[in-house]
Amino acid sequence: MNGLTPIRTVRLIGAMIAVIGMIFVLVSRVLTAVLAIATDAIHLALARYSNFTGRIASRSFAEDKQLLAMVKDVNALLPTAETALTVILVIGIIVLLFALVCLAFPMQSAHVLVALHLLKWDMVEPMEGLLEDEKPAPSTPLSMRAKVAIAGSAGGVLLLVLLIALFSGISEGRIVASVDSALKDMQDWAAGYVDAQKTYFARNNDIGGPKSLQLPDTAQTDYFKYKVTGSRFVAENKVQLGDCAAGNKWIISSSTKGFFTKELVLYRSLPKDSACAKLTPDFKNIGRHKKNTANPAPEAAK
């Protein structure tokens, strides 16, 4: 039989379904990468508007107020978007598994499709391999259409594997970029505390607490949680950052010395875990003048 037999028809259907499944998976991976970028942007925007200058901007300028409201709305939609992407990925995998079954077991799949009335065939020509009382027909070379379908499905599977590997690499790079961004954000928070403490000391000749410094006493992002007390800034990582385990702390302590002439003294402390300390080699120089960066002693400001 030279035309499309039921088995060849099932194989062709399987190849077409495989293409659809690959499209679902590809769309899922692309949207996952886009969502990761959007999530980082949203979290950075929220962190930006939670610090001192960001809060002033959001209270003083209409554009910043509107932008902050939009960021909060989008942030509320992120869990729904993640669920939708998971559903798309699951659908793609199910479709690919169905296509794989059709390609691997075309005879059995044809039986099922005919039984479910999803596949019809002209019974004038016996359905090769489907009628139990029919003698097996001699094997014939595959038609050009069948060869194209099989080659297309094989190429599609290979393309799918390559795309998954590609987007997995992109996701890994995105995770590394997110960690670097979180560490930079943490150091920006620390620098904001140092600047606020210096400004307050210059005006009041004393150290200030979070309310006086116009800083939140507690805050957190996906990677860090922050705490500001009357004399200390503490950043603690909530999740593992590379080889740095969760629960390590970066600390800046404030104190004054002197009686008639007071000085502000800032102590910057890295985590005891060396794997964490090496992530932020410049932490001890936060807020220092460039000429003092080589001096490891605590900074004193008059």
Image: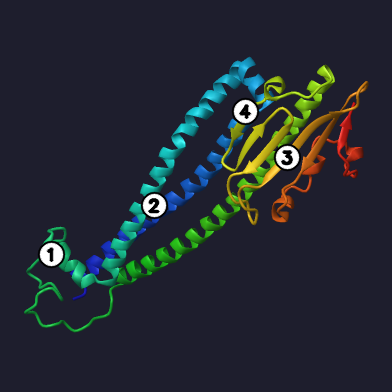
Q: Nearer the viewer, residue 78 or 188?
A: 188
Q: Residue at x 13, y 72 (%)?
A: 127
Q: Residues within 10 Å of mark 3 (few under 14, many from 20)?
A: many
Residue 198 lies left or right of residue 117; in this view the side is right
Measure how far apart labels 2 and 1 are at the Cα level: 34 Å
> CA separation, marks 3 and 4?
19 Å
Residue 61: tell me if it is visible.
Answer: no
Q: Quadrant of the N terminus?
A: bottom left
Sequence-wise first label, 3 or 4? 4
Q: Please determine whether, in this image, residue 32 is positioned above or below residue 120.
A: above
Separation of marks 1 and 4 at Cα, in angstroms:
67 Å
Q: Secondary structure at mark 4?
A: helix
Residue 197 horizontal/vertical position (percent): 77, 26
Write down the residue under mark 4: 50
Dot 4 alpha-carbon crowd within 10 angstroms: few under 14, some 14 to 19, many 20 or more: some
The reply to whether discs 3 and 2 touch (Cβ–Cβ < 8 Å) is no
Could you tell whether 130 is left or right of 253 in the image? left
User: Which SS class for mark 1?
Assistant: loop
Number of the front mark, 2 or 1: 2
Circle 2 sits on which residue?
89
Residue displayed at 50% across by 43% down:
35
Q: Which residue is mark 3?
A: 251
N-term mark: 3 or 2: 2
Please report whichever mark, 1 or 4, sits nearer to the chain's N-terminal start: 4
Q: Which residue position is annotated with label 1? A: 121
Q: Disc 4 to disc 2, how far (Cα)?
A: 35 Å
Pair 3/4: label in front: 3
Task: Provide the secondary structure element on which disc 3 rests.
Answer: strand
Q: CA distance from mark 1 to mark 3?
A: 76 Å
Tally of marks: 4
- How would you rate the neighbour count of disc 1 (Cα within 10 Å): few for under 14, some for 14-19, many for 20 or more? few
- Quick check: marks 4 and 2 in contact, CB under 8 Å? no
